[in-house]
Amino acid sequence: MTDQKFEVKGQFRISDKWKPYTKVIEAPTEKLASEWTYTILGSKHRIKRNYIKIDSIRLTDGE
């Protein structure tokens, strides 16, 4: 199965503020795109999954 590009939008909590984010993730499925978003943001910003909210995931045209 080939990877597709998904645009993931949401917000994550740093200190006491919620910051918005938009990521383009290459993954075979929408579920894996959400899992990889949690992994990338958690690793980069050292935050737990309950401080990361995903508002929308949509398939992009491959731009």
Image: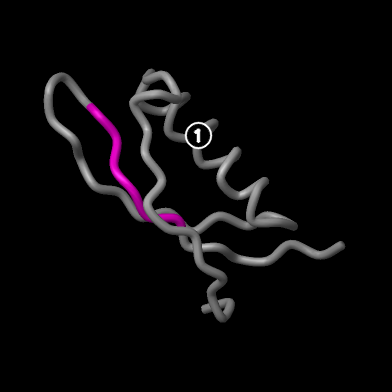
Count of all numbered marks drawn on residues in the image = 1
Examine the rendered structure and indicate whether residue 20 appears above or below residue 49: below
The magenta stretch spans which residues?
A: 8-13
Q: From the top left corner, tell me how far across and down residue 21 is, in percent.
A: 30, 49
Give the residue at x 47% y 24%. 43
The amino acid marked with disc number 1 is Tyr
Q: From the top left corner, tell me how far across and down residue 35 is, in percent.
A: 60, 38
SS category of the residue bearing label 1: helix
What color scheme is it? Answer: one colour
Quadrant position of residue 45: top left
Examine the rendered structure and indicate whether residue 48 appears above or below residue 11: above
How many C-alpha atoms fall within 10 Å of the one at disc 1: few (<14), some, or many (≥20)?
Answer: many
- Quadrant including the N terminus: bottom right
Q: Is residue 5 left or right of residue 28?
A: left
Quadrant position of residue 50: top left
Q: Is residue 58 left or right of residue 11?
A: right
Examine the rendered structure and indicate whether residue 20 appears above or below residue 38: below
Q: Could you say which is closer to the camera, residue 17 or residue 62?
A: 17
Residue at the far right in the pictured view? 1
Examine the rendered structure and indicate whether residue 47 appears above or below residue 62: above
Q: Per the image, is 31 magenta?
A: no
The residue that label 1 is drawn on is 38
Give the residue at x 68% y 66%. 4
Secondary structure of the magenta portion, mostly? strand
Q: From the top left corner, tell me how far across and down residue 62 is, in percent.
A: 58, 77
Residue at the far left in the pictured view? 16
Q: From the top left corner, tell me how far across and down residue 49 is, in percent.
A: 45, 25
Give the residue at x 59% y 40%. 36
